[in-house]
Amino acid sequence: MLEAHHLVKRFYGTAVVDDVSFALRAGDVTGYLGPNGSGKTTTVRMLTGLIEPTSGSVTFQGTRIGDDLIEFRRHLGYVPEEPHLYPFLSGREYLELVGRLRELPEALLRDKIPAMLASLGIGDAAGQSIGSYSKGMKQKVLICAALLHDPDVVIFDEPESGLDVGTALVLRHLVRALAARGKAILYSSHMLESVEKVCGNVIVLHRGRVVADASVLHLRTVMARGSLEEVFSELVLHEDPERTAADLATLVSAR
Amino acid sequence: MAASRTARRLLREHFLRRLLDNDLISPNADRHEALVLLAAALAVPGLVITVLILGQKYVIGIPTPALTSVAALDDKFLYISASMLVMALMAAVQWDALALDERDAANLGGLPLETRDIGRAKLEALAMFVAAFATLLNGVPSVLFPLLTVSHFHVNIIAVLRMVAVHAAVTMSAGAYAFLTILLLRELLRVLLGRRGFRRLAGLVQAALVVSLGTALLLLPAIASNVPARWLTAGDAVRAVPPAWFLGLYEAGTGEVTLTIRGLGLRIPAGLVVPERQAVLLYDALIPRFSELARVAAIMLPATACTALALYMWNNRRLPLPPVARHRPHGQARQLALRAIGRMLVLSPVQSAGFFFTVQTLARSAQHRIAIAGACAVAIAAAILLMQGIRAIGSAAAAPARLLALQTVVTVIVLAGVRQALAIPAELRANWTFSMAWNGDMDPFVAGVKRAVVAAVVLPLLAAVAGLHAYMLGARAATAHAAVGLLVSLITVEWLVRPEKLPLTCSARPSGNLKALGPIYVMLLFVVAYNVGRLEQWALTGGTIRFAMLVGGLLLTYSVARLSHRRGRSSGDGSRSPLLARVELDDLPDTPTQRLGLSEPV
């Protein structure tokens, strides 16, 4: 459904994303893993058309997204990493703005928005300004905004950031339910446990390059590891975490 | 544990940066450039007024000591009032940055610093900011104006230096008093209303202050004329006029020099002997009043400062907590009313998006509110000038054209402010929302924006002006006049709201050539408004047919404006393709100065 072909993004000559290719298929949840600065968010921004790749392309149903970005975005839902919203709007007003820009009927918005906000536990605060929301509440608004128009492709960039345990569980079930309804989902996260539970396939990114692209089960079998966390450590972390932590603790105590 | 001197210095610098990096200066703008422009904007008007306007008056016009002393009262009043109004306006614009806020609490709350020290550092930064502002504003006139007033007389250097020092001290103290008064008002409201109530009302109070102070500043030349007759000899009411207190202080400080110059025994030209004698009598009669006013200033300045500072320290004794969303049912009635208005005025979902987003942004975003409040100040000042000398008439037949022109002048000025506000992004970092959800057609969104401007700005404005006209002309004529006003406003909206980029998302300068064309636009506005006024006079006095002809003509103009807008858009670079270019995520404001780039590599 959505395919990345040899994506490269350079900033001031440095390749932040280097020759990344993968495909999101209908009904699949693909995890996108990598340490800080590995190029996850840059890839996601190229997939959504928010930035253009230096080279390579993104295609949606065989067509380059840049050829008709607006049409592509009609089918796309996106939860960004940073919850930048209009602080003077209420949660409901923000969702109404998004729904109207997406040309959804007013009657649908009237029913759907309060129900979605209520199901994520912020129905009572729907009329309060977003400026007074906690990070988790903003994240819930972003999730509602991404799903309001029933998109075919959903890209989550760190969706659990700031969410309480209960909502994070709801989100995991929601992602699986959406995939069961035929949506293609990219789930970019640091939370290995979530990715392991939610995603069928995993792409691991390290220093801008794909170091693994397979099913979670396959990775665990091939690398003879018991969990995704151990696989991730093997692929990405070249230092011993315990030793790094000990060094850091020594630094903290230094006077 | 008190903070170290280094910690206090760092805090002061941090708060000073925050005062300069506020909403007025975009975080992406070049701070040095913006500061240079701000400094020039503060210093140049004083220089121009002193050298070009007052220079002629004193060097060429008035050669005798008492006449100079009396004439100088107007100018001193002008300098003092200008200093007060500009400083108060600055405080009103910086309203949110005057006290510690949630960001300060988040950044500094975790550090081992006492809240008292943080509050004190913020206050010191404010004091430095106010001192720099006041010096830039009053520095040049403080040196030049005393020199001008003694240019005909042989006065020793000590006396001149004393006059310079008094001018600087009085104008800066007056400015500081005005700033402290706004701070006092803010902190008093905070105490009286509580944090939640204050948060709710603060925006409204800030807008009201900007409107009233801006109007007073624009009307200052009229207010500061004939000061002895208008203010100083007009009974005890002058005790309630703060600039007069500081004028008293000024004269109390320089009175000795004035009397010394008079005692030099200069030769008075024959034609000026009588006026000079009258001026001596007038000035001498005012001396007790100056002393009395000086005493009021001497009491009010420290009293205001102490009260403001005490309230400030009280309100900032704890770092503010971030606002917390309350889980409670919200205003259903307001929602229903808004929805009903939306349904009446807009048709498609994207039009609704433009309509509601515009209403919400203009009403709730501080930057947009200030832009419109500034325009309202100009409009009210223009209205007051146009209304001068006009009394209730009772019919449109006898109404002067300038009374009928008032409505057009006011609406066009406010709509120009709205156009400016629409070019300010509501929140640049949230623009991704538009990028992701944009449907590719700008016209319906802009149509919604226009309807919002009509509903939220034009109609309330016309209702306010209609109230005035109903009193002046009678209800029937006022209704007809308001109908004409609505059509003129619709034409103005079509003419002014023609954004090349998506309104409220991109920082688009409405007119890059405003500095050159601004005066022409102002002249054009008054010419058009007077002619519309004359046409209305003709129509309102000639029965239904003439009025129908006027309305028909305006409707035709409106249709032509709409058609030309549509044709302009469709003859552009396509109806869909340029739209994403118009929703620019990191759209920086244009630089206000020309970059020569001489140091850049070729």
Image (cartoon, rainbow, N blue to C red):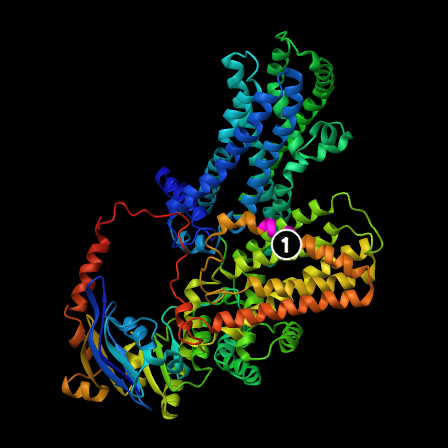
Chain containing the residue with disc 1? B
What quarter of the picture does the N terminus of chain B occupy? top left
Which residue is depicted at the point 23% across and 87% down? A215
Q: Quadrant of residue A239?
A: bottom left
- Relative placement, left or right, of A156 versus B571 is left
Is residue B37 shown above or below A155?
Answer: above
Would you say residue B526 sits in the magenta stretch?
Answer: yes
Q: Is residue B71 left or right of residue A176?
A: right
In front: A134, or B479? B479
Where residue B49 appears, as percent x and y from the top left, is 55, 33
A119 versus B224 height, above or below: below
Residue B514 sits above or below residue B170 on the image: below
Is residue A92 in view from this perspective?
no
In the rendered image, residue A253, in percent from the top left (x then y), is placed at 23, 53
> What segment is highlighted magenta in the picture?
B522-528
Identify which residue, B98 or B260, lies in the foreground: B260
Residue B265 percent coordinates (x, y): 63, 7
Residue A218: image quadrant is bottom left
Compared with B480, B192 (above or below) is above
The residue labelled by disc 1 is B193
Question: How busy is the neighbourhood of tag 1: few (under 14 within 10 Å), some, or many (20 plus)?
Answer: some
Q: Which SS does the magenta portion mostly show?
A: helix
Task: Name the amino acid type tagged 1.
Answer: Leu
Residue B507 magenta: no
Closer to us: A172 or B215: B215
User: Element under label 1?
Assistant: helix
